[in-house]
Amino acid sequence: MLTPLVKDIGKFVLKVAVVFAFSLIFLVTVNMGNLLFPNNWPKENFAVQGSANTNVSPDSFSLTLGRTIRNANTIRLQEQADKIISDARAALVATGLEESNIKIGSYNIYPVYSGDGNEISNYELMITMEIKVEETDLANNPTRNLINEAAKAGMGEVRGVYFYLKDYEKVQRELESEAVRDAKELATRRADESGLRLGKVVNVIYGGGQGYYPMPYSSDAAVRSEMLATPAPDDAGSSDTTSTENNFPIGETEVTQTVTVIYETL
């Protein structure tokens, strides 16, 4: 027959076992819940795209001039080329252009073979001179005077004219800020309409817009420049060629910037 002490100990052990069993069941249930419905699972993201654009007019341009000459003697060929370069540089500086904005782009000599291709009959030298003009009032077409003066000095081929915006990065930064604001406003509006609760911004992706590219201009300017380099006959009147116009349409270019802003949803 069990004594009261043994009975009490048995009841105590039973209670401890029951409490332990319920605690174990609770812990297993909580852990299963965390596995099935974890709070640290990746949350859904909400992405929205914003954009901004503006029209810009170029404030600078680059001009590539050239000349191709031939001579059977390479020494005389180079002397002739050096004179053309020197005269053209002096003529351009005389217009007010900084000498630091004038550089030789290419200087190449090639052999010219006879009809049968077995002997060198001549040598050809191709020169290009690159000119850069920044922050200029392009409405006054400074290209006209530069082309005319260089052509009269012997650099009579226009290989290319490119108009560009000097501080494009500044415009791009301004558009990026506007595009981010546009994306945030759009995100707020869409969240209100759909009932989403937005959390913090987890990522911002820049790009996807239309950037600014230099605007090339090409025409028969090389032919006209060669004509300008040839003085008019005495009986044709004045040989002053500065009245001949080289008008280059400048226009505007649209610059667009887009950003994608990604939010965490709550």
Image (tube, helix red, strand yellow):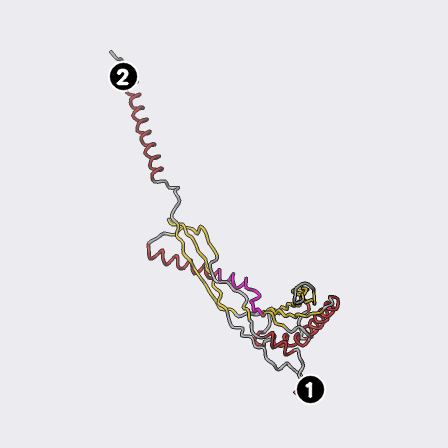
Q: Secondary structure at mark 1?
A: helix
**Left-right relation of 82 to 197:** right
Q: Position of residue 121 (x, y in %)?
A: 70, 67
Q: Position of residue 195 (x, y in %)?
A: 33, 54
The residue located at (32%, 26%) in the rendering is 20
Pick whichever of labels 2 and 1 is earlier in the sequence: 2
Which residue in the protein does label 1 denote? 234
Which residue in the protein does label 2 denote? 7
The disc at residue 178 is none
**Left-right relation of 216 to 146:** left
Q: Position of residue 125 (x, y in %)?
A: 68, 67
Based on the picture, tell me whether residue 113 belongs to the magenta stretch. no
The quarter holding residue 59 reads bottom right
Whole-number angstrom distance, CA of label 2 to CA of label 1: 140 Å
The quarter holding residue 190 reads bottom left
The quarter holding residue 16 reads top left
Q: Nearer the viewer, mark 2 or mark 1?
A: 1
The residue under label 1 is which amino acid type? Asp
Highlighted range, magenta: 161-176
* Foreground of the two, 44 or 125: 125
The residue located at (67%, 75%) in the rendering is 95
> Which residue in the rendered view is the most extreme toward the front?
116
Q: Position of residue 107 (x, y in %)?
A: 67, 64
